[in-house]
Image (cartoon, rainbow, N blue to C red):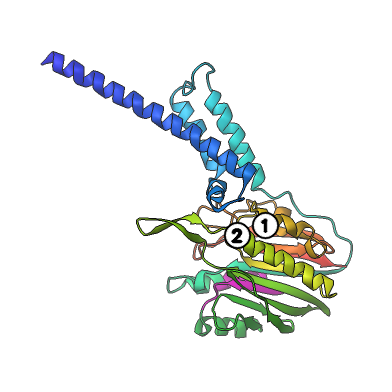
Amino acid sequence: MNHFRNRLFKTGRLLFRFLIVLITITTVLMIGLAIIGQLVRDRTVELSLLMYIPLLPLGLWAVFWDGLQAGRSLPRFRFSLTLIGLVVSIWGAISMMGWGGSHAESGTEVTVLHWNVYWGGKGKDDWQSISDDIEQMQPDVAVLSEPPLSYKLNPFLKQMGWSTIQYQGKNTLAVCSSWPLQLEGYVRIDNADAMTVIVTVRGQPLRLLAVDAGRNMSKRLVIHSKQVLPRWRTPMLTEIAQTLVAYQDQGQPIDLIAGDFNAISLSLGFDAFDQAGGGYHLASKFSLDWRGTWKSYLPLYDLDHVWVHKRFQGLRTALFTNLKSDHRGQLVRFVVP
């Protein structure tokens, strides 16, 4: 009997040790894949999956796991996995934090709010909570992705004294303001709804390109009826950059781009925004906040973006959270010289 117990105990210890080694190997492998994703980015659909491995929680997990083993997760150097985890965590935090606002000379300040409001929320009082937040911020322009249906939205617009332009035929975008609005036209973008709207704020006409990207999962790989690869966003982002250039060449530059892109800012397609059409700043980088917008309770990914033309000054951004929506919103301020 004692012999059987000893063998059972030894087997249990071996299995436990095997599990520890397996978790350690998996952790190191995931860190390696995440680093490859950050460096190579979404050059293909398959590589884009690696880009979505979040560095910060992975690094924190590595530190925690190594701590449980008194720093002996990896051979030779004690706390080596802790050091790796700290480096990865710092990298992840720095890459997702804003660096604060920019200086501005005197001019006309404009505030633009973008928020995916999740159709007004699912609960009975969700839209009331969401609309209260919007009212409190009093933006000059509000770009709402996934706005609520008209029976919810219209009373709020009337209360605010706003008019709206919505994407025709689809309830994907609403541009709202108390200032004059003019629909300039719909823009053909691969896998996205887009339109240009002229909003005249305090006598300053601004051309806004509002964008709402389609669903984020690709049909290229399906496992048990589940799509497991993110959609490759490079074609969509390339078309948007080409649109910016085309408007600039016509002497009608786009001043603002806002929407739910379903693409993180690390995506290669966004690189062209730095120069296209005169160049644009990613507004969230001019905040002092964590820049993730989805999901609101654990915003690991920045899928929602506002891009502001570089000719504007004093760019400042504040991100905010209301758990009635599954996305965080952002309030962007800039000065028109």
15 up-or-down from 190: above or below:
above
The residue carrying mark 2 is 233
Q: Closest to the observer: 278 or 259?
A: 278
Q: Closest to the observer: 271 or 260?
A: 271
The C terminus lies in quadrant: bottom right
Q: Closest to the observer: 286 or 234?
A: 234
Dot 2 crowding, Cα within 10 Å, few <14, some 14–19, many 20+: many
Residue at position x 59%, y 83% from top? 168
Q: Which amino acid does label 1 sit on?
A: Gly
Q: Which amino acid does label 2 sit on?
A: Arg
Q: What is the C-alpha distance between the residues marked 2 and 1?
A: 7 Å
Residue at position x 65%, y 78% from top? 176
Which residues are the magenta region? 131-148
330 up-or-down from 210: above or below:
above
The residue carrying mark 1 is 269
42 up-or-down from 250: above or below:
above
Whole-percent x and y of residue 325?
Answer: 51, 65
Q: Can residue 22 be seen in this view?
A: yes
Whole-percent x and y of residue 248?
Answer: 82, 70
> What is the quadrant of residue 263 in the picture?
bottom right
Q: Closest to the observer: 97 or 126?
A: 97
Residue at position x 32%, y 26% from top? 16
